[in-house]
Every structure is written in C-alpha cells, then in structure tokens.
Amino acid sequence: MSEFKIDEKALKRLEEVSARRNSDKVFCYNCKCDTKQKILFEQVEIMPPTEIVFFDNDGIRKGNAWTIEGQVWKISQCQGCEKINMNVFMRHSPFEDDVLTHHYPTKDFRPFPMWVTHLNRDFTELFSEIYRSLNIGNVRLPLMGARTLLDMFIVEKIGDIGTFKNKLKKLVDEKYISESAQELLEVALEYGNATVHRGYQPTKEEINGVLDIIENILHSEALKDQTKELKRTIPRKK
Ligand SMILES: [Zn+2]
C-alpha cells in the first residue's frame, strides 16, 4: 500500500497565503498607509471563464488557454480615520496571494500636479490625459503623451523648424532652458522615441523620471504665471 504523504511545503504556503488574506491590515486611501481595518463586507464571486492569449518572442499569437478566477469584494473601515475603503482582488488559486485589481477611492501612482493649470488649456488637458492613463496602469501612452508635451512646448517657444537637437540648442540659446536641462531633455526624448518607434515598454521608474524632467521645465513656465497672479494681489500698504 502506498503511503499517503502530506506536502509540508504546500501546506505551509497555504497557511501563509490564508493568513495574508485574513489580515486586518488594509491600505487606507486617507491615511496613505496600511492601517488596521474592520471588515464591513466581504464576498467571493466566481467569474465567467477568461481567455488567456500567449504570444511568442516575435509577438505572434501562439495559443490560448481558459482560466476560472474568483473575484473578492472587500469593504472595510479604517480604525484610525474611520474612512471606508473598497478593494477588489482576483483569486487564482489557494496557493497564490490575491491580486489587487481595483481600489476605491483610488490610490494614484503619481498624483496630478495642480500647478499645470497655470499653463494654457492645451497643456492642462494633455497632462490630465497622461495622468489618467498612467494612474490606471498604462506606461507607453503616458510616455508618448509626455513626448508630445515637449513638442508643444518647443513649438510654442521657437516654432517648428529643424531637427529636435537643433531645437533644443535654440531653446538654450534663447535662454528658455539651461544646458543641463538640454541634456536631460535629450534623455527624455530617447525614451519617447524608443516607445513611439520601437514599441519599447518603459518601467514605472523610467516614466517617472521622464515626467520629472519635462515637468521641471514646464513648472518654471507655470511659476511665471503664478507670480503674475501673486503680483496682482499683493496686499497694499495702508
Ligand atoms: Zn485611515
């Protein structure tokens, strides 16, 4: 008779995953950290089968498979600030941690910088699309958008003549940007080009870096407008 063996490793994994699922530590949108929370509602529903498609190294469709997942809805109340948080997780197997797919109110990867509203409306609207796309998990579209922001800034300042390198040089000559900023913008542009022309998938750190560079330039523009506004409202001496 064959002996029934318990897989100790699998059992331990099961216990660990289950402990994390039942933990009362949940991210609170208001406290902006994991806090102790009281679970108000929790339910698992079985989702309709989902098709998973596989691609080979050349990006050609290779095959598919079907999977059944559970969707876990959890509403909890922070025991610190008393605000309500809603989380939705995908559950693939008892041996894997649930994967967070939705959180409400949302936890932004990069919060929208309100100073951009001091640039003109075209910039504000494009910024808003970039941030909405970025904060739902996209990386390529935001980077393409960031590249467009840079083009818009250049055209506005010096027009649309010559190669990009020449335009940057002209921006420096006409004192719109410094030489160190020129170097940074060249780096930002390389990422933009790789994404637009070669389908490069940037990491979140890279898109953060590119946005930091471009926003740095545009922020000084926004400050000029903010300063004008402040000058108008300087409290007068009596
Ligand atoms: Zn809280």
Image (spheres, rainbow, N blue to C red):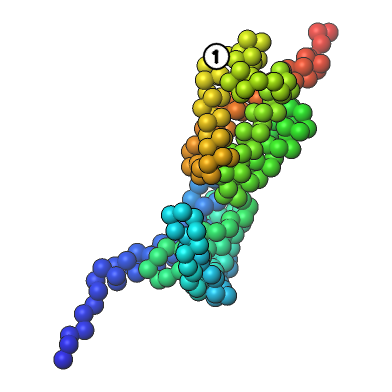
Q: Can you say whether 7 is above or below 85 in the image?
A: below
Residue that appears at 46% across and 54% down: 58
Q: Nearer the viewer, residue 46 or 56?
A: 56
Residue that appears at 71% across and 18% down: 158
Side of 122 where 140 appears, left or right: left
Side of 153 where 33 appears, left or right: left
Residue 24, how many percent across, how many down?
A: 47, 60
On the question of residue 208 being in view, the answer is: no
Residue that appears at 44% across and 65% down: 22
For badge 1, the amino acid type reads Glu
Q: Which of 21 and 194 is in front in this view?
A: 194
In what quadrant of the picture does the C terminus appear? Answer: top right
Q: Which residue lies furthest to the right in this view?
A: 238
Dot 1: what SS? helix
On the question of residue 25 being in view, the answer is: yes
Residue at the disc numbered 1: 179
Residue 192, how many percent across, how many down?
A: 56, 35
Q: Can you say whether 98 is above or below 59 in the image?
A: below
Query: Are there few (<14), some (14-19), or many (20+) residues within 10 Å of tag 1?
Result: some
In what quadrant of the picture does the N terminus appear? Answer: bottom left
